[in-house]
Image (cartoon, rainbow, N blue to C red):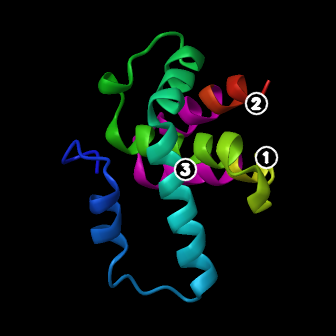
Amino acid sequence: MEGQNDFSKSVMDKFLEGKISETDEQMDYAHKLMVAFIANKEEIDSMIETASYKWHVNRMAKVDLAVLRIAVTEIKFLKGCDVPEQVAINEAVNLAKKYGSEESGKFVNGILGRLAK
């Protein structure tokens, strides 16, 4: 979605179409996450920018931004999905370390830590 700059429901549906997961529960969660993100993208990006001391999202590394968006969506907009805030932050930091740059884990942890306060 980021690469195409298209955050529409039709793109989400194309992405989820034919995806195989271990359980229907995982697909339901992925769908809820994507719907919540699409509905709240501007607010989520604003929260990230504010917590990153006005670093604009368009200047952030794409991996870091994707990880932050997922975590902020889980923390702020999926309260009924039973993902504790600290778990969402820890998973985000681990994803950033694995798929981002050498500094990604610290960057993501700092922003999410500020948002959690």
* 74 relative to 12 in the view: left or right: right
Q: Which residue is mark 3?
A: 36
Q: Is residue 96 magenta?
A: yes
Instruction: Residue 3: give x, y in percent of width and height.
Output: 21, 47
Q: Relative to 98, is 111 on the left or the right?
A: right
Q: Is residue 23 above or below residue 103?
A: below
Q: Residue at x 63, y 34 (%)?
A: 109
| Residue visible at 40% across and 41% down in the picture | 101
Q: Residue 7 placed where, x, y %?
A: 32, 47
Magenta-colored stretch includes residue 101: yes
For the residue marked with disc 3, what is the amino acid? Ala
Tell me which label, 1 or 3, sits earlier in the chain: 3
Which element carries disc 3, helix, strand or loop?
Answer: helix
Q: Which residues are magenta?
A: 89-110
Q: Earlier in the sequence, mark 1 or mark 2?
A: 1
* Mark 2 residue crowding within 10 angstroms, few (<14) / some (14–19) / many (20+): some
Q: Mark 1 = which residue?
A: 86
Q: Which residue reaches farthest top?
A: 54
Crowding near pointer 3: few (<14 within 10 Å), some, many (20+)?
some
> Is any part of residue 47 visible from this angle?
yes
Report x, y in % for residue 106.
58, 32
Q: Amino acid at mark 1?
A: Gln
Residue at numbered disc 2: 116
Label 1 vs label 2: CA separation?
A: 9 Å
Q: Of helix, strand and loop, which one carries label 1?
A: helix
